[in-house]
Image (cartoon, rainbow, N blue to C red):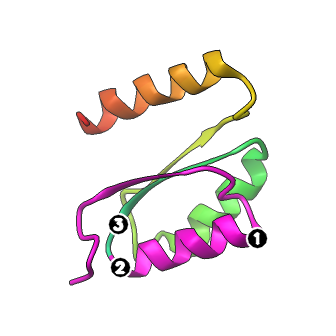
Amino acid sequence: MGRFDKKIVFLTGSGGGIGRAIAERFAREGAVIVLTDIDNDALLETLGIIKDNSPHSVIYKLDVTDENMIRDVVKKIINKFGK
């Protein structure tokens, strides 16, 4: 059991680099991660890396400079996870 078992983590920029490394760490700690990035292919790659440790994690393509897109993704997260 990890420190973040069943906690929902909303992570931007998780398609690579530091964001991917953070996603990997949260996955090892048991979190369910909402992976977001502007690059959908990179998101799929990150999801593939963490799926064994965090099988309920999801991806959403997100441009954090687009306020409407942020609202839409947050609504989807609330609908999916109830939080």
Q: In this view, does 18 lie above or below 42?
A: below
> For the residue marked with disc 2, what is the amino acid?
Glu
Q: In this view, does 62 lie above or below 34?
A: above
Mark 1 burial class by Cα count in 10 Å: few <14, some 14-19, many 20+? few
Q: Which residue is drawn at 44% across and 72% down?
A: 26
Residue reaching furthest top? Answer: 68
Distance from disc 1 to disc 3, alpha carbons, whole Å, reads: 19 Å
> For the residue marked with disc 1, what is the amino acid?
Gly
**Residue 51 seen:** yes
Residue 37 in percent (x, y) is at 70, 46
Residue that badge 2 annotates = 29
For this view, does 10 lie left or right of residue 79? right
Q: How many labels does the image show?
A: 3
- Earlier residue among tags 2 and 1: 1
Q: Quadrant of residue 49?
A: bottom right
Magenta-span inclusion, residue 10 = yes
Residue that badge 3 annotates = 31
Image quadrant holding the C terminus, namely top left
